[in-house]
Amino acid sequence: MTGPKDTHMISLVLVDDHRVFREGLCALLSGEPDLHVIGEAGDGLEAIQLIERLQPDVLVLDLMMPGLSGYEVALQVSQQVPGTRIVVLSMHRNEGYVLRALKCGAAGYVLKGSGVSELIQAIREVAQGHRYLSPPLSERAIELYIQKAQDTPLDLYETLTPREREVLQLAAQSLNNTEIADRLSLNPRTVESYRTNAMRKLGLRTQTDLVHYALRHDILPMNTSKASSTVTVRLRPKA
């Protein structure tokens, strides 16, 4: 496949916690004359730091990751680095996942299992300021998705500050205050304050409540979800 006539190089950062998949994807995308992978990350916190430093044209992002979820990464990147366009690469074709990704700032949504040519097309489309959804999704009309995403009522989770969301996600992964403080370069007492405020806002009382909430809201991926994603990733080589 040849690149577009425009010779502008599109800089990319890839974020997926499966290293083998990420390296394979990097090799495929780097074969395109107009695409340049400038960074990779396998953790949500690492991803945000990397994107703030490199400010790529496009971020290719998985949704379910350790550290911070892809949703949180998308939300923070869209707010803090608005020049970076986001393409979500996900195994989930359910409308709820798509709507939430768009609401968090994604401009593209590509299903794992698609051909790599489709991902390349999505990257080029969003880099030019357009939106892109995989064909099985876009058949329902992209504008309908966007409208639904905008009309969805505010969730209590969205009332949390970015730092409260970060602490909450790490706490749901069973990290204690000291461990969270180390990850976020904060004081443990500050972490406890963020954690207490977040749980109060969400009406949560115990660690069990927190884990259940995180699972229901896809903040904490279930092991079965991650295991299945290693099987369903089938980005096909270009013809």
Image: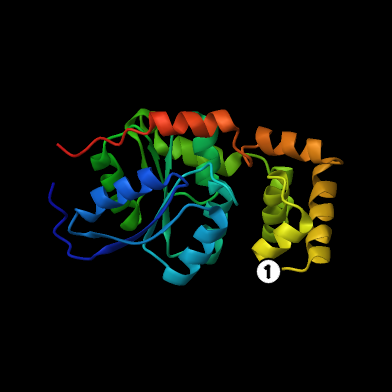
* Disc 1 residue crowd, few under 14, some 14–19, many 20+, Cα 10 Å: few
Q: Is residue 167 above or below residue 150?
A: below
Please indicate whether residue 195 sits to the left or right of residue 124 in the image.
right
Q: Residue at x 80, y 44 (%)?
A: 202
Image quarter of residue 21: top left
Q: Residue at x 42, y 69 (%)?
A: 54
Residue placed under numbered mark 1 in the picture? 185
- Toward the bottom, the furthest residue is 53
Q: Is residue 130 above or below residue 228?
A: below
Where is residue 125? Give x, y as percent: 30, 50
Position of the C terminus by quadrant = top left
Where is residue 201? Give x, y as percent: 82, 48
Q: Residue at x 70, y 60 (%)?
A: 163
Image quarter of residue 192: bottom right
Q: Is residue 189 above or below residue 145?
A: below
Q: How many marks?
A: 1
| Residue 225 is at least partly visible in this image | yes
Where is residue 41? Give x, y as percent: 45, 56
Determine the secondary structure under disc 1. Answer: loop
Image quarter of residue 197: bottom right
| Residue 81 is at least partly visible in this image | no
Q: How is the image coloured?
A: rainbow
Kind of residue sitting beneath label 1: Ser
Q: Residue at x 65, y 37 (%)?
A: 217
Front one among 230 and 104: 230
Where is residue 118? Give x, y as percent: 27, 40
